[in-house]
């Protein structure tokens, strides 16, 4: 479906909590539909927690991992998620000439990291059920969209009936990529030149895993 953008003042968000508050205003229509908000660790969980609070919604996480290109780990040639979901950027793989065997090795390594991270971030609770529900996947921004795409695939594999993606800022091509797989994409800002997600925040301090665990422990019971 076509992505949606919201008109707002230009300039950086104060921090992830402030961005979550702005994003929640544009997700208000979902309040009456009993959504579950899924944050992408680590930074996306802070945004998601504020969205969940504003909507009175349940909060959980989707653990996914980018598959980095050789020599450039921030350039995603794909992503993996819980449940064995694998997303691949075929165009970029062809451009880089990355062999199937090399891609599989990187995929296996990323899948192992996903499981290890799940063990750390969910020490005392399981995965929230999403079957039959509306899910809103939230991150702090979209650069390539590969990680969020993996999260959408994970939610569909777990039985979600509708999956929306909500982000404060995203590159236009990444938003378009998500619009092809999600039921709806809500992006507050789509700058022509992203310049990195962090450039759109006054405070883009790295989020720790301890903070993610704390936010999950504070979430209300369904």
Image: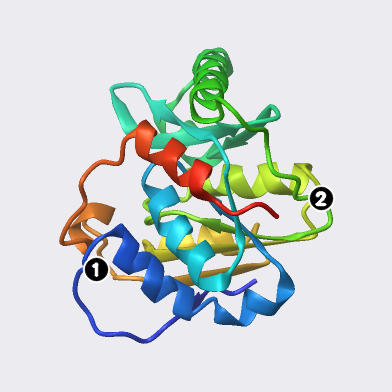
**Label 1: element kind:** loop
Residues 91 and 47: in front is 47
| Depicted 84 relative to depicted 49: above or below | above
Spatial CA distance of label 1 from label 2 is 33 Å
Q: Position of residue 112 (x, y in %)?
A: 55, 16
In the figure, is residue 142 to the left or right of 185?
Answer: left
Residues 36 and 159: in front is 36
Looking at the rendering, in which quadrant would you find the N terminus?
A: bottom right
Asked which quadrant contains residue 203, the reply is bottom left
**Which of the two discs, 1 and 2, labels the residue nearer the N terminus?**
1
Looking at the rendering, in which quadrant would you find the C terminus?
A: bottom right
Do we see residue 36 in this rendering? Answer: yes
Asked which quadrant contains residue 16, the reply is bottom left
- Tell me if mark 1 has few (under 14), some (14-19) or many (20+) residues whose alpha carbon lies within 10 angstroms of its own: many
Residues 67 and 138: in front is 138
**Label 2: element kind:** loop
Do we see residue 188 in this rendering? Answer: no
Q: Position of residue 161 (x, y in %)?
A: 80, 59
User: Residue under circle 1?
Assistant: 13
User: Residue under circle 2?
Assistant: 131
In the figure, is residue 194 to the left or right of 129?
Answer: left
Residues 63 and 153: in front is 63
The residue lying at 65 percent from left, 57 percent from top is 181
The residue lying at 56 percent from left, 13 percent from top is 101
Q: Position of residue 142 (x, y in %)?
A: 40, 55
Instruction: Give me the disc on residue 49.
Output: none
């Amino acid at each position: 479906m076509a992505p949606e953008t919201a008109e707002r003042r230009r300039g950086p968000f104060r921090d992830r909590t402030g961005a979550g508050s702005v994003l929640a205003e544009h997700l208000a229509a979902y309040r009456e539909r009993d959504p579950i908000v899924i944050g992408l660790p680590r930074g996306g969980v802070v945004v998601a927690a504020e969205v969940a609070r504003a909507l009175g919604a349940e909060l959980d996480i989707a653990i996914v991992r980018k598959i980095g290109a050789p020599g450039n780990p921030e350039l995603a040639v794909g992503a993996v998620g819980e449940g064995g979901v694998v997303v691949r950027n075929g165009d970029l793989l062809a451009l880089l000439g990355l062999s199937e065997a090399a891609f599989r090795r990187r995929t296996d390594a990323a899948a192992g990291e996903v499981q290890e991270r799940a063990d750390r971030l969910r020490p005392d609770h399981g995965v929230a059920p999403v079957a039959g529900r509306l899910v809103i996947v939230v991150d702090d921004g979209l650069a390539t969209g590969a990680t969020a795409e993996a999260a959408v695939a994970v939610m569909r594999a777990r039985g979600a009936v509708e999956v929306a993606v909500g982000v404060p800022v995203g590159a236009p091509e990444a938003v378009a990529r998500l619009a092809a797989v999600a039921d709806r994409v809500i992006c507050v800002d789509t700058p022509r030149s992203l310049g990195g997600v962090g450039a759109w925040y006054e405070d883009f301090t790295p989020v720790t895993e301890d903070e993610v665990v704390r936010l999950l422990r504070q979430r209300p019971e369904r």
